[in-house]
Amino acid sequence: MANTEQDRWSRVKGRLRTSVGEDIYTSWFARMDLEGVQDESVHLSVPTRFLKSWIQAHYAERVLSAWQAEMPEVHRIDLTVRSAMRAATPAKEAIAPVEARRPERNDARPMQELRAVATAPVSASHDALGGSPLDPRLTFASFVVGRSNTLAHAAARQVAEGRRGDAVMFNPLYIHAGVGLGKTHLLQAVTWAGNAAGERKVLYLTAEKFMYGFVAALKTQTALAFKEALRGIDVLVIDDLQFLQGKSTQAEFCHTLNALIDAGRQVVIAADRPPSDLESLDDRVRSRLAGGLVVEMGALGEELRLEILKLRIKAAQALHPAFDVPLPVLEYLARSITHNGRDLEGAINRLLAHNTLSGQPVTLEMAEHEVRDLIRPPEPRRVKIEDIQRVVARQYNVSRSDLLSARRTANVVRPRQVAMYLAKTMTLRSLPEIGRRFGGRDHTTVLHAVRKIEGLVAKDTALADEVELLKRQLQE
Ligand code: ADP
Ligand code: MG
């Protein structure tokens, strides 16, 4: 694909990001790829049907206007679902230049040997249960362990190695992390490994699949069968729980969760935020989720990124033995592509495509050119309400429970208002949600606090400095 088109796409994504905000952008658009532009229409793709219908229903206009801002002649957006198992595409296609633009599921299939042993029987039984497609590359063997994911990896391994009848150690296991930091990889690794042992049934479902399965089952009057099937499995793995929407699905999820946990079955969950931040779920579900082991995976460190790159290259070499990436290039990539694992994968795909198509060796100069749009400024840190409460309490020398309490003495009222103000300005949480997290206060109280501090900051420079300092501490 022409570079101008890539650049344009990067700018359109930038516009979208600004127009919908970071959280929504990562939830819905991070996995959207450009397939091509033709005359008046732009062809985009997303990995699931659910994303497609959601974007069409809620963001079609925004996507179109973001494009029109770059290319006024565009009048149509075609959105399609990328095939889930691109893993099965032949090598020929995998190195085509268009493919190289799609960071997900598309490099020259590595891990051939692993696929050969693991895929067939596990996939078949998994599909029969109605599971979401599994990517044969996402196994423990290809998961690199580093500082940011040691605990999550250890817990996942433990779960995968459990046997039927073993006491369950932590239930559910809840893993959260930002986009591209390895959640899906780890969850699918658990599924492959658990099923390969042959003794237990491990079912991997995306939250979308859970919803669709349930809704479809309701329509065809087989909801009971669906529930029974779910309850008949040993380990339920649910990915991207933040996408679970709708009252009846959530109620059903809650029942399933309770039934499984009470029956001593293991539940593993991944989401892009901690349980307390899953706003749409009700309190009982949230506390049940938080009642197991909650582990966060942090950003991939430079060493970890280097190891991931090396592993990917090794895998690519299985199909393209002549593909070679000199160490300085590797180090350059590991140092500059800091964002997430998907971009690392995308970078290798591009180098591979360039190398195989042009026959030119991979050089630093070529790499810099090929991956320049993958190099982004570091993502602002995700600020959590707990962090705000902790930092504010420390600053004003009150306790966190004072902030949440009903006390109305001046020495707690002001810090509480500052904390609410920071929660409103530094997170995407709604006013009612913030009220809930501050000892169950009403949203009007939060609004009052936010306005109050806004007003004061404009006049009182000492307070303005204090607030600035708190913000900086929270962003570090
Ligand atoms: P998430 O589900 O958190 O958005 P994924 O699991 O899809 O992220 O990971 C994105 C990409 O990065 C995948 O290609 C994955 O294999 C790779 N990746 C992430 N973390 C690791 C890791 N620790 N080891 C190897 N590959 C990783
Ligand atoms: Mg994922």
Image: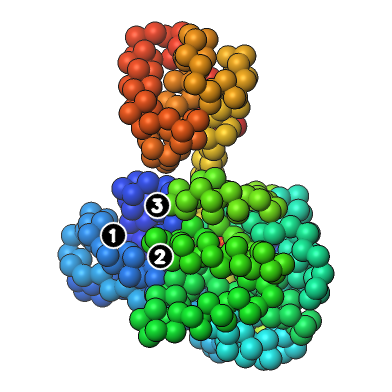
Q: Looking at the picture, tell me which residue is in the foreground, 53 or 41.
A: 53
Name the residue type under label 2. Ser
Q: Which residue is mark 3?
A: 24
- Near mark 1 (Cα within 10 A), the count class, few <14, some 14-19 or many ≥20, is some
Q: Residue 156: give x, y in percent of width and height.
A: 73, 63
- Near mark 2 (Cα within 10 A), the count class, few <14, some 14-19 or many ≥20, is few
Task: First in sequence, mark 3 or 1: give its number.
Answer: 3
Q: Tell me whether the residue at label 3 lies in contact with that at label 1, contact meaning CB atoms closer than 8 angstroms.
A: no
Horizontal side of 223 relative to 11 (left or right) equals right
Q: Which residue is mark 2?
A: 248
Residue behind label 1 places its C-beta within 8 angstroms of ligand 1: no
Name the residue type under label 1. Tyr
> Height in image: 177 above or below 198?
above
Q: Secondary structure at mark 2?
A: helix
Q: Is residue 405 visible?
A: yes
Q: Which residue is mark 1?
A: 59
| Residue drawn at point x = 39 percent, y = 78 percent | 218
Q: Is residue 108 visible?
A: no
User: Toward which corner of the image does residue 164 lie, by quadrant?
Assistant: bottom right
Horizontal side of 26 relative to 69 (left or right) equals right
Task: First in sequence, mark 3 or 2: give its number.
Answer: 3
Q: Secondary structure at mark 3?
A: helix
Of the 4 image quadrants, the one containing the C terminus is top right
Inter-mark Cα distance, 3 to 2: 23 Å
Q: Residue 46: give x, y in percent of width and height.
A: 41, 70
| Residue drawn at point x = 22 percent, y = 59 percent | 61
Look at discs 1 and 2 and give the one toward the viewer. 2
Inter-mark Cα distance, 1 to 2: 24 Å
Of the 4 image quadrants, the one containing the N terminus is bottom left
Q: Secondary structure at mark 1?
A: helix
User: Toward which corner of the image does residue 98 lie, by quadrant?
Assistant: bottom left
Look at discs 3 and 2 and give the one toward the viewer. 2
